[in-house]
Image (cartoon, grey):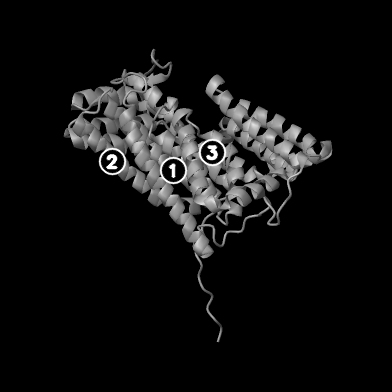
Amino acid sequence: MTEKKKFKLEVPHTYVLLLVMVLICAVLALIIPAGAYETAVDAATGKTIKVPGTFQFLPAGSALSFFDVMKEFVFGMESSSDIIFFIFILGGAFTIVQDTGAMAGGIHAMVKRFGKQQNLILILFIFVFSVFGGTIGMAEEVIVFVPLVVMLCKQFKLDRMVALAVCMIGARVGFTTGLLNPFTVGVAQGIAGLPLYSGLGFRLIWYALILVVTCIYILRYAKKIQDDPTKSIMYGVTVEEDETPDEEVALTGRHIAVLLLFFATMVFMVFGVFRYDWYMEEIATIFLIMGILAGIIGGLGANGTAKSFVKGAKDMTYAALMVGIAKAILLVLQDGGIIDTIIYYCAGSLEHLPKMVAAWGMYIFQLVLNFFIPSGSGQAAATMPIMAPLADMLGITRQTAVLCFHYGDGFTNLVVPTLGSLMGAVAVSKVPFDRYLKWVTPLCAIWCVIGLISVTVAVLIGFGPF
């Protein structure tokens, strides 16, 4: 008697999931009528904004063909070239440092010295990233730190999910809750006519709450997988582990020199972002220079340095391509002309609701819209010119409308596949996107509930420009 073969449901590859999302968006573009607002340049922020009351439906017959939809994948690669090449250069430079043995020696020395303070180190990292997220709007830059924290977590017997959470979600805590974020709160308040960074005290309260909740969530998971490795979200996932050998590596003079160069580059990067508004091109350049110098100082030689760079860049191919493919989702929505239509219908549906319900509606609207417009400043330019006067009409303060915007923009950034910085960080960490979603969705839900409570309090107290 032959044994029946057990049916096993295979989880779709990340690229397959993204392709399906692109096709779903293409179908939406066929169903939802295309429309557009007129645009103008906002004097306060210099951003191109949508002019309220100017929405018009576009003529029919401009739907995307199947060929146009597939072409969006190519355009996605082209328009994401800055992030893609950033990832390639980062991978190459980091592998050079890694191949010198300096990183392995440094991580072993750190774990030997501070291994018993594991939770304190993780909390410190989360806090520091949250400060960067809340002040310089750290997003794509966090990708730089993921490989380093992956190596550290490996020595703590923790998985890649912890490393990804510490870096990326840590930065999102600050980015989302506003603080002094120039790309969300700064732009939105400028468009709404509010004093720059006003309302900081109120935002700090909710930042502290979300930071504490996030630390508890991450640390509980870390303890769970240390007690039972089979509870890891990465259990059963095969990942090439080539970052840090398990045996102890003694630090040499060359190793110390490479590490000093590496951390000097990190400090220089932060200084450049703060002082000169550096972005990916400049950061990639200094990491390229750092990689070359590290290869020379670390004794790899010209050929060894080149081989390490190529190896590191090759290992980042999956991550780089995923960013471009994810961008195709957004391009289909933009070229289908349905984003303005969604904003028009949603804004109109809020006009006749009671004040509290309307505020909740604004918040939920921004949460959903973030899938279509994942850029913080882009979403502010698209919605605040419409939401600010709508808030006046509903008796809601403009400060509350800004709160709804930056929470809505930030919370679902944990899960939207249209966000290049998220997809890049997930891919560089080598955590499968479906596993990441399974891990992060409960945390995202907790954040959303806290945000709803914050918006409710803001309406009750008449949160204003203080």
Residue 196 placement, left or right of 422: left
Between discs 1 and 3, the one toward the N terminus: 3
Residue in view at x 28 percent, y 37 percent: 454
Under mark 1, the amino acid is Leu
From this viewpoint, is residue 100 visible? Answer: yes
Up the image or down, 49 lies above or below 435; here it is above
State the image coordinates of residue 25 (x, y, percent, origin top left): 43, 41
| Residue labelled with disc 2 | 452
User: SS of the residue at dot 3?
Assistant: helix
Residue in view at x 45 percent, y 50 percent: 218
State the image coordinates of residue 46 (x, y, percent, origin top left): 43, 15
Q: In which quarter of the image is the N terminus?
A: bottom right
Residue in view at x 78 percent, y 35 percent: 297
From this viewpoint, is residue 58 visible? Answer: no
| Residue labelled with disc 3 | 67
Alpha-carbon distance for marks 2 and 1?
17 Å
Q: Nearer the viewer, residue 119 or 319?
A: 119
Q: Quadrant of the C terminus?
A: top left
Alpha-carbon distance for marks 3 and 2?
42 Å
Q: In the image, which is nearer the foreground, mark 3 or mark 2?
A: 2
User: SS of the residue at dot 1?
Assistant: helix
State the image coordinates of residue 308 (x, y, percent, origin top left): 75, 42
Alpha-carbon distance for marks 1 and 3?
31 Å
| Residue labelled with disc 1 | 414
Q: Which of 177 and 310 is in front in this view?
A: 177
